[in-house]
Image: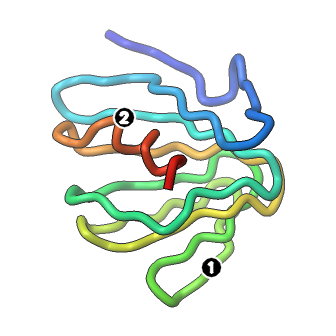
């Protein structure tokens, strides 16, 4: 059994979001991404499906040319190879659920784009 909290021990980065792996098993990888207002993850994609849930705050979420505001409690699922980006409208906590074949290193690499 594994357990974690998306709201405990939150650390905000000064210049970029903070990515923290919380749970990894044979089925999924659960990651917390903590944004200060104004921080972003530039347009990127993965080969695998993902699910993104806003735990706290609000995110301007782009999928291709479409933009939407996701607020606490909202969840969105994307198929693989879909370009998307995130911009924090306020301090925010995001849950990213990855396919077991995807990697936390790839997600961290998005911050270097």
Evaluate if marks 1 and 2 touch, with contact meaning CB atoms under 8 Å apart: no
| Location of residue 60 in the rendering, given as x and y in whole percent from the top left corner | 67, 70
| Location of residue 23 in the rendering, given as x and y in whole percent from the top left corner | 38, 23
| Location of residue 9 in the rendering, given as x and y in whole percent from the top left corner | 71, 17
Q: Is residue 47 left or right of residue 13?
A: left
| Residue 67 in the image: above or below residue 40 | below
Q: Secondary structure at mark 1?
A: strand
Q: Which mark is residue 92?
A: none
Disc 1 crowd, CA 10 A, few/some/many (<14, 14-19, 20+) = few
Q: Is residue 55 left or right of residue 106?
A: right
Q: Which mark is residue 104?
A: 2
Q: Earlier in the sequence, mark 1 or mark 2?
A: 1
Q: Is residue 113 left or right of residue 91?
A: left
Q: Quadrant of residue 15?
A: top right
| Residue 5 in the image: above or below residue 61 | above
Quarter of the image that includes the N terminus: top left
Q: CA distance from mark 1 to mark 2?
A: 25 Å
Q: Is residue 32 left or right of residue 92?
A: left
Which residue corresponds to the image point at 45% horizontal and 15% vertical from the top-left?
3
Which residue corresponds to the image point at 32% horizontal and 33% vertical from the top-left?
29
Which residue corresponds to the image point at 65% horizontal and 67% vertical from the top-left?
70
Q: Secondary structure at mark 2?
A: helix
Which residue sits furthest front?
112
Comparing labels 1 and 2, the label whose residue is closer to the camera: 2
Q: Nearest the camera: 24 or 85?
A: 85
Disc 2 crowd, CA 10 A, few/some/many (<14, 14-19, 20+) = some
| Residue 17 in the image: above or below residue 13 | below
Which residue sits furthest bottom?
65
Q: How many marks?
A: 2
Which residue corresponds to the image point at 58% horizontal and 40% vertical from the top-left?
33
Q: Quadrant of residue 71?
A: bottom right
Q: Which mark is residue 68?
A: 1
């Amino acid at each position: 059994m594994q357990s974690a909290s998306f709201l405990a021990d939150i650390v905000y980065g000064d210049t970029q979001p903070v990515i923290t792996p919380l749970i990894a098993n044979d089925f999924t990888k659960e990651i917390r991404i903590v944004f200060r207002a104004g921080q972003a993850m530039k347009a990127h994609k993965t080969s695998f499906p993902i699910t993104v849930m806003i735990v706290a705050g609000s995110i301007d979420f782009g999928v291709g040319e479409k933009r939407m505001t996701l607020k606490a409690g909202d969840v969105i699922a994307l198929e693989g190879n879909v370009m998307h980006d995130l911009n924090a409208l306020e301090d925010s906590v995001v849950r990213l659920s990855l396919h077991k074949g995807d990697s936390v290193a790839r997600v961290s690499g998005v911050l270097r784009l």
